[in-house]
């Protein structure tokens, strides 16, 4: 057994590099600020009750200016002041918001829904209520994204989410959860064909709340970064790439269960380059393997899914990758490997890495009060590795989690690159979450995206075409 520590991967921004999204945007601006010409206005549409729309306007105004960091801040690198979302500072853009891009929901309508005793009926009625207003904005106004504000009284009646551990579980959601309608997922799925990404917010998050666990500056960072990405611009940051190495295509393979349980699992492919640009594709229904009780693709399904994904990727990013890195949260069968390999060879991709990422019960003990460092890499043997993507972060000078961190088990099935480079890339991919500017996430975007996409895709009908961009699912 060997132990290494991987340095925190750098990210690229408009005028420089940093390990931290906040520091990079603050000092070097968003990545696409290096491009000219570029749009520097984001038109924000909104749906909600009258007072909620007013609160949103006040919050957007506040985000336009500097927001100081939290008081009694012992970790300034973690709790960084917000520079303001405007044309002069980090994001180099401004929000445009007004009455002409908002749609008001009457309080009497939400009150009527609240009185309904059936959960699924309340969710269905709420989805229809918001959808008709979203549809009007998407079809009659020029908006980049639409914010849906859920009144506080309605939120508890329709928007209850399943609470996963902060560390992000790799496992699928429980079967019992499939029977209960989920407002966020159902609304995003129903509105997807309109072609405008949604941001759902609870009204409470727009109100001053000194007792909130998240300070205003952190809320502004995450809110503005998510809207910036959803507005259709390029990503706020990208992975730092080596110009002397071939371009990389990262692929995540996932599965999701249909809500009616008539189809056991359907396959998904998420494919990204170092920029985070890429496509999301829905595959075909698959069967459960009798040996490991996991869904697996047949050889033909594996070939067709990856072939289609690579074709869409080439069309979207205007180039073919030089290397393929594939992540799954289950083991590969021989049939899957054969199909994926053939598709890669047909696309003339000759450098390939097939990786499985799993949860593990193995833990390391570190002397002192803090857990192992994020980036700790343990080589059990040439094919089996442990990687701490959560742990103590020297940059933050603390461990930010609430639970004992759990490393990922990295199984190298087939690889042309070294295990150290593969683990370094996985660590870097945990930072490609544009919904959160805290960079020590547990899962790489390839696997995290599979979870988010599957949650919403199960609400789409078979004849409905899913959007290919991640902003519609996050």
Image (spheres, rainbow, N blue to C red):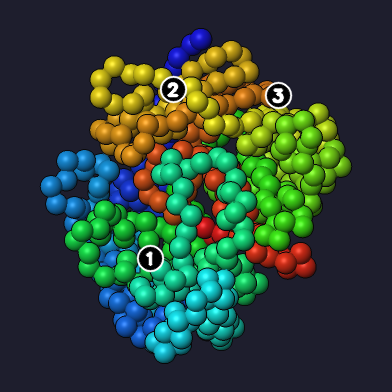
Q: Earlier in the sequence, mark 2 or mark 1?
A: 1
Quote the CA–CA distance across marks 2 and 3: 25 Å
Q: Secondary structure at mark 2?
A: loop
Q: Secondary structure at mark 3?
A: strand
Q: Are marks 2 and 3 in contact (CB under 8 Å)?
A: no
| Residue with the mark numbered 3 | 414
To which quarter of the image does residue 294 belong? top right
Q: Which mark is residue 93?
A: 1
**Of 381 and 204, which appears nearest the observer?**
204
List x then y, in percent, for residue 182. Answer: 54, 64
| Residue with the mark numbered 2 | 363
**Of 325 and 206, which appears nearest the observer?**
206
Is residue 264 among the parts visible in the rendering? yes
Q: Look at the picture and state if 324 lies above or below 31.
A: above
Q: Earlier in the sequence, mark 2 or mark 3?
A: 2
To which quarter of the image does residue 92 belong? bottom left
Quote the CA–CA distance across marks 3 and 1: 44 Å
Q: Secondary structure at mark 1?
A: loop
Q: Which label lies toward us, 3 or 1?
A: 3
């Amino acid at each position: 057994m060997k132990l290494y520590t991987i340095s925190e991967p750098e990210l690229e921004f408009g005028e420089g590099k940093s390990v931290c999204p906040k520091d990079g945007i603050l000092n070097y601006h968003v990545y696409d600020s290096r491009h000219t010409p570029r749009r520097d206005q984001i038109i924000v549409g909104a749906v909600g009750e009258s007072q909620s729309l007013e609160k949103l306007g006040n919050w957007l105004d506040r985000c336009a200016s500097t927001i100081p960091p939290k008081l009694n801040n012992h970790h300034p690198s973690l709790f960084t002041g917000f520079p303001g979302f405007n044309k002069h500072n980090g994001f180099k853009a401004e929000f445009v918001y007004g009455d002409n891009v908002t749609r008001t929901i009457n309080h009497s309508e939400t009150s009527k829904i609240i009185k309904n005793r059936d959960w699924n009926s309340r969710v269905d009625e709420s989805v229809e209520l918001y959808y008709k207003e979203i549809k009007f904005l998407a079809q009659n106004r020029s908006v980049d994204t639409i914010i849906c504000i859920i009144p506080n009284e309605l939120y508890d009646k329709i928007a209850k989410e399943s609470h996963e551990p902060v560390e992000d579980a790799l496992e699928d959601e429980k079967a019992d959860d499939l029977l209960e309608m989920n407002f966020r997922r159902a609304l995003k799925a129903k509105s997807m064909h309109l072609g405008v990404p949604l941001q759902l917010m609870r009204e409470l998050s727009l109100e001053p709340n000194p007792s909130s666990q998240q300070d205003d500056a952190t809320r502004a960072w995450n809110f503005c970064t998510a809207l910036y990405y959803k507005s259709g611009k390029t990503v706020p940051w990208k992975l730092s790439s080596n110009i002397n190495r071939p371009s990389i295509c990262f692929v995540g393979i996932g599965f999701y269960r249909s809500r009616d349980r008539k189809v056991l699992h359907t396959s998904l492919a998420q494919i990204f380059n170092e920029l985070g640009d890429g496509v999301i594709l829905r595959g075909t229904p698959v069967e459960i393997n009798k040996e490991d009780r996991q869904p697996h693709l047949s050889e033909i399904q594996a070939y067709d899914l990856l072939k289609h994904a690579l074709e869409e990727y080439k069309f979207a990013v205007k180039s073919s990758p030089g290397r393929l890195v594939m992540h799954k949260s289950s083991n590969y069968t021989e049939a899957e490997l054969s199909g994926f390999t053939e598709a890669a060879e047909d696309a003339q991709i000759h450098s390939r890495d097939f990786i499985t990422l799993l949860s593990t019960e193995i833990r390391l003990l570190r002397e002192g009060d803090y857990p192992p460092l994020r980036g700790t890499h343990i080589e059990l043997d040439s094919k089996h590795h442990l990687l701490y993507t959560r742990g103590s972060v020297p940059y933050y000078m603390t461990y930010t989690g609430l639970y004992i961190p759990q490393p990922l088990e990295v199984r190298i099935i087939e690889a042309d690159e070294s295990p150290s480079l593969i683990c370094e890339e996985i660590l870097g991919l945990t930072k490609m979450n544009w919904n959160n500017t805290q960079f020590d996430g547990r899962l790489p975007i390839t696997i995290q995206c599979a979870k988010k996409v599957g949650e919403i895709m199960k609400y789409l009908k078979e004849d409905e075409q899913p959007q290919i961009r991640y902003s519609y699912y996050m």
